[in-house]
Image (spheres, helix red, strand yellow):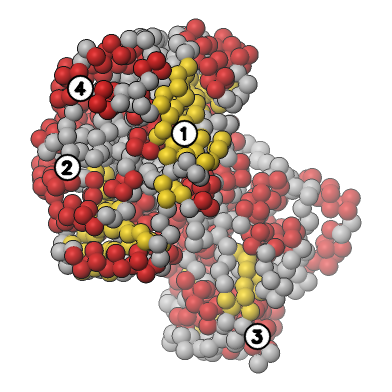
Amino acid sequence: MVEHTRDTSELARALNAAVGGEVDFSAAARALTTMDASNYRRVPVGVVAPRDADDVAAALEICRRHGVPVVPRGGGTSIAGQATGTGVVLDFTRHMNRILGVDPDAGTALVQPGVVLDRLQRAVRPHGLVFGPDPSTHSRCTLGGMIGNNSCGAHSVAWGTTADNVRDLSVVTYSGTRHHLARGRQPGSAPPGLTELVDGSLALLRTGFPAGLPRRISGYALDALLPENGFDLARAFCGSEGTLAVLTEATVRLVDAPAARALAVLGYTDESAAAEAAAGLLTHGPLTVEGMAEDLVPPGHGLPRGGAWLFVETGGATPAEARDRAERIVRAADALDGTVVDDPAAMRVLWRVREDASGTATRMPDGGEAWPGWEDCAVPPARLGAYLREFRALLAEHGLRGTPYGHFGDGCIHVRIDFDLLTEAGVRRFRAFSEQVADLVVAHGGSLSGEHGDGQARAELLPKMYGDELVGLFGRFKDVWDPAGGMNPGMLVRPRPLDVDLRFAVLPDRPVDVVFGYPHDGGDFAGAVRRCVGVAKCRTTQAAAGGGVMCPSYRATGEEQHSTRGRARLLHEMLAGEVVTGGWRSTEVRDALDLCLSCKGCRSDCPVGVDMATYKAEFLHHHYAGRRRPAAHYAMGRLPQWLRAAAPFAPAVNALGRVRPLAALAKRIGGIAPERDLPRLAPQTFRGWLRGHMGERAEVLREGRTAVLWPDTFTDHLSPPVGRAAVRVMEAADIGIVLPPGRVCCGLTYVSTGQLDRARKVMRHTLDVMEPLLELGVPVVVLEPSCAAALKTDLPELLDDDPRSARLAATVRTFAQVLEECAPEWTPPHIGRPVAGQTHCHQHAVLGDGAEQRLREKAGLNGELSGGCCGLAGNFGFERGHYALSVACAEDQLLPAVRSAAADTELLADGFSCRTQLDQLAGRRARHLAEVLAEGLAAR
């Protein structure tokens, strides 16, 4: 068995000299790869990103010479721990991520291991083809990882597992030999001794594997090497979890994609009833038979009547044919209720609920944590209903809870369980339950793994499924390929115990002293960081359909440390203190968070609600405590006080700002990017105008038709026309307006720069001013989405000790929301123009934009606004060093949408940052929705 050297500096030097790709042994690189999407954590010695197969061979040679094991890694979405290790991690996502060729006639594609599945699907879609296996992580999992785990996905009832769709593989062993593994009997491609091993074990291979099980993923697929199965080396390699050799290229099979699809949604009383019905639907030739219960379905889902559902997808040459097949399934199914969905957008919404389940299932309905400790077993489909009933009983016996869902048509169940993995007693229960549920699966003729592999989570239990003799043969099979034991040791054979290396063990056992309240995590910052289970939805290279935001910095850089998951991993390691040793002073965490835009997209788009904007503010507060801050924190973090001081001298300040040397000096002193233009101050503040407009009259409070108009800093000092327009519209809608009696501020700029003590002081003053108005119980309309979001979330989470904060947060409304609430009968002017622009990322994440969409529709403003983040993001895009990334984020969705818009398109952007970004990068003026409606009123 390989045991790596303690001094890694010589190893790093040797790898740097031999490998063309990046070699990174830094604390940050190691911290980013300590975990995958499992419960396990192991610290590697370093990370290598090879450029090609020669780099792989060179890295293996160096590691072998130094006695260091190797762990191949793709997207890091494995759920059983097999993408973690203590040696050198080979990261294939950076360079070996190309599609080398597509042969539509042969129905094949040649890919490198780091190709993300969705990239392959986009490349072959124009040919009417698709790669059949499609795990829910399809937007970030890699083909190499899928081959390593023999991944399946929702469509396996039609197109099988990854092993069913692999044609041939090129691999390099730890000893340096290269093999080409193809379908058909080619014993000459096998490592020495393999043919003899198989020939001497024919009886065991023919009797040792369960039959009639479409999702048998556990162990090695040695029965693929039987003569009657064609000595299929490629199939036997699939599912080996990086324990045999390193994959460098793969030829995969493609299948014809249905021209049209429909979805039959069937409701049942509970998951067992749905499971029992699933097998009977297979005779109709569906593309999917997926199941989930109401625990995982959001309120207002609009699904058919029931407590659990089957999603049965059908295909056809035409939409009518696909729908007809789905309707036949609804009629044939013995369901409580059923419907057919064939609108592509509606189908995407439903599939998104299913695909996010691996994240949403990590939170119980009462907010408790759940984990993937028993994630994806499979039983024969006909036994699934009975298995689920006994599984539920076993959960109850151990005092555990879980929410099963998954591939009911294949008998494969996913479940997250509320294991207590933080205490010794909880870990003992975790082990006891795992052993007993393994016995239950085997009693039903099932496989411990039905999709994600064994890894560390289940390999120890394989003797229960296969017996000691066959598991011993697994060990001999690995030794033929990897006699030195350097390939991903501790997985599949001679495994690490399932209850060691748990990633929670290194976290502090008592709450960390923090400023935010973390109400959804019991006030525990470590609990908040634990939210990230590694699902990695933040690592998608394209924003989600329907206005998704997360994660703009990752899409711009492609670097793990700039993803939400990467930052969460670094915070986890900061709390652990083993790899990242600087605590709150950590430069590794600071550098990773530096490019976080605080867009809040992860708060809504992450399946488990990681809130990196809050974590960043918390970190910056501690990191700079008692220390000098970056100049931008003083210049832009304290923007409200500077704007108030400058307001009486606005014309003079604007004139000085037009003097280029003075502007350049101001930007240099303030830490502002030299490429940026300084915004112009309004000659009259919105608050000053509104006082004059309202005169001395006291607004008469009318029940249900009065609102407080919040004079946020941006509207007040930088864009008063937005406020004036909102007043005209509200008056036209007969909504009474009340102005706060004193200066108010949401504290956003202080929060985003981590000046939390100042933020709390500003917020308390605001609550003092607003307290008399809170007694009125009227809505507070906030025109700037980022300020509204700060009042809704940051205010009550920073001042959780002040009940007034929750009361103010509950009253906050957007402009469209207050019109809908206070003047539901009002008809806006008909504008009749198409729209383009952007929904503010904070509005998407915190406030929602349903009211805005309805208001636009009433006004004849047609079209969708883009998602993503504009890239300016308050102070972020103004800070020195952020300009290039800010532009890249704008180029992701906003700028292309605006460039492609027709000449008569109305550009909408309710956020000051979004409007400023469009003005400075595209030379286009966007407007707040209130401005467009006010203009329409004037034209009536």
* Residue 484 image point, x, y percent: 38, 9
On the image, numbered disc 3 is attached to which residue? 936
> Looking at the image, how many numbered discs can be counted on the residues?
4
Residue at 20% across / 38% down in the picture? 213
Looking at the image, which is closer to me, 342 or 619?
342
Q: Secondary structure at mark 4?
A: helix
Residue 380 numbered mark, or none: 2
**Which comes sooner in the sequence, label 1 or label 2?**
1
Q: Are marks 4 and 1 in contact (CB under 8 Å)?
A: no
Kindly report which numbered mark, 2 or 4, lies closer to the viewer in this rendering. 4
On the image, numbered disc 1 is attached to which residue? 251
Q: Residues within 10 Å of mark 3 (few under 14, many from 20)?
A: some
**Structural distance between the alpha carbons of marks 1 and 2:** 30 Å
Amino acid type at image mark 4: Leu
**Which comes sooner in the sequence, label 3 or label 4?**
4
Q: Is residue 54 above or below residue 106?
A: above
Amino acid type at image mark 3: Gly
**Which comes sooner in the sequence, label 2 or label 3?**
2
Q: Determine which quarter of the picture holds residue 481.
A: top left
Amino acid type at image mark 2: Pro
**Structural distance between the alpha carbons of marks 3 and 4:** 78 Å
Kindly report which numbered mark, 2 or 3, lies closer to the viewer in this rendering. 2
Q: Are marks 1 and 2 in contact (CB under 8 Å)?
A: no
**Which comes sooner in the sequence, label 2 or label 4?**
4
* Residue 243 image point, x, y percent: 37, 21
Residue at 39% across / 67% down in the picture? 319
- Left or right position of 19 against 280: right
* Residue 679 image point, x, y percent: 76, 61
Q: Determine which quarter of the picture holds residue 211.
A: top left
**Structural distance between the alpha carbons of marks 1 and 3:** 59 Å
